[in-house]
Image (cartoon, rainbow, N blue to C red):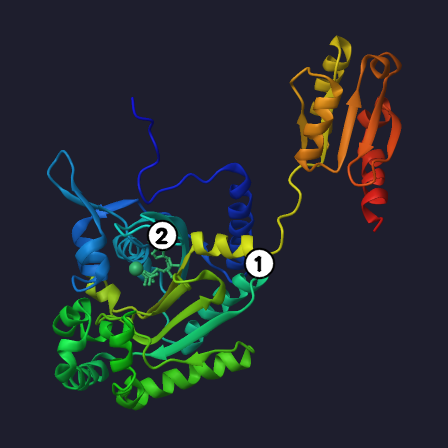
Amino acid sequence: MASLQASRGTRDILPPEVQTWQAVEAEARLLLQQAAFQEIRTPLFEQTELFARGIGEGTDIVSKEMYTFLDRGERSLTLRPEGTAGVVRAYIEHGLAAQGGVQRLWYLGPMFRYERPQTGRQRQFHQLGIEVLGSADPRADVEVIALAIRLLTRLGLTDLKLEVNSVGEGVDRQHYREALVAYLEPHRDSLDTDSQKRLTQNPLRVLDSKDPRTQAIVANAPSLLAYLSPMAHQHLERVQQGLSDLGIPYTLNPRLVRGLDYYTHTAFEIQSEHLGAQATVCGGGRYDGLVAQLGGPHTPAVGWALGLERLVLLTQKQGRPAGRSLDIYMASRGPTAERQALVLAQVLRQQGWRIELDLSGSAFSKQLKRADRSGAPLTLILGEAEAQEGTVQAKWLTSGEQQLWHQADLLEGQTTLQRAFEEILSKP
Ligand code: ATP
Ligand code: MG
């Protein structure tokens, strides 16, 4: 029988890597809480129509990347390719708008897109996303962008590039679209095939093309910024001002777009030099038209989504190393020693220590090798001699220093161990 493997475009995240994921998630939770964001959890599949309307028929996602299927009741369902549509559906369905004020929501979880798998691009991947619903204030855009930057920086990432643009309001874009099509039409035959299709369906997306020849043509296209209304200009200026006030460097990229009609004003992306071809870690912007598009009350909104696979790749490359996950490794050999070790480990855990008990019963030399590999700074060693005397050997990983302790001291309270840890680990 052929051996079974994870499906193409999916991967297992094994325990050592999960540590990085948890560190990233913990940092995100902390920062989001500080900024008064609340978590929302929506289903992994939704009616197909939600994504068709909420992401747009003319997009790559809807036209070729969705995992769509009929369930046993012949309903067309789709595994969510992104988070915003589901969040907005829930926002409308539960009348969150009626609660008034601004809703600050975040989500984290798997997304599904049928794409060609490569580094930083999978078919099941994970996004962390935030949505601020109910504010048209440019400061909301700034707050949202600043949160992404702060998260990435706190994780130790450098060489990030923030690009900002405005796609204006509906009418602005209508005029711009006409100008863009007029400019591109004579070059139609030189564009890549995808861009030729987009020229009719969703011309702004041509600006996004990765094809070098198309890019060269696009370089001389009219600039979106020239088509912004005074209102849109003012919004963009206030976003830029806010970013400067916070000391966040950015570049204005007039070719950065989000192609659909419900996108308004701010669009932005954060890229890293260290990701190769899949350079974008985070993308977002304002979508004042979406809630109404999905049947809710007119609600201005802004948000982003961040690709966690890419973020984890980056943290592994240049982030701060994760803190230690184990304090103590416990080795024991001999019937009495093994019984005592079981009790000692249990009591030390109750005191708050993270402790791994070696269950192998193998020679101490083997147990100590495993102790080294575990990364625990301290190994407690209990042989029959120690068991008879009620003592335990303490061996420190970095210095190799060994001490003899009384079990009673350890069982009594936390102070002995606490002091020993502080003393040893404070040495350079
Ligand atoms: P790309 O240009 O890389 O295809 P996108 O425009 O499709 O990105 P968004 O829909 O804006 O991406 O999603 C936000 C983020 O989610 C991306 O910046 C990226 O970090 C991540 N992401 C998107 N698709 C994938 C995927 N297939 N695998 C892994 N991460 C992804
Ligand atoms: Mg994509």
User: In the rendered image, which residue does mark 1 sit on?
Assistant: 318
- Give yes or no for contact between labels 2 and 1 (Cβ–Cβ under 8 Å): no
Q: Residues within 10 Å of mark 1 (few under 14, many from 20)?
A: some
Q: Residues within 10 Å of mark 2 (few under 14, many from 20)?
A: few
Q: Position of residue 178 (x, y in %)?
A: 15, 84
Q: Residue at x 25, y 50 (%)?
A: 114
Q: Residue 264, located in which quarter of the rendered image?
A: bottom left
User: Is residue 30 shown to the viewer in this render?
Assistant: no
In the rendered image, the vertical position of residue 30 relative to residue 401, given as above or below: below
Q: Residue at x 25, y 66 (%)?
A: 290
Q: Residue 265, located in which quarter of the rendered image?
A: bottom left
Marks 2/1: CA distance? 21 Å
Q: Residue 335, located in which quarter of the rendered image?
A: top right
User: Is residue 242 shown to the viewer in this render?
Assistant: yes
In the rendered image, the vertical position of residue 424 relative to residue 264, given as above or below: above
Residue 340 is marked as none
Residue 118 is marked as 2
Q: Quadrant of ligand 2?
A: bottom left
Q: Residue at x 83, y 29 (%)?
A: 394
Q: Nearer the viewer, mark 2 or mark 1?
A: 2
Q: Taking 328 as reference, is 13 left or right?
A: left
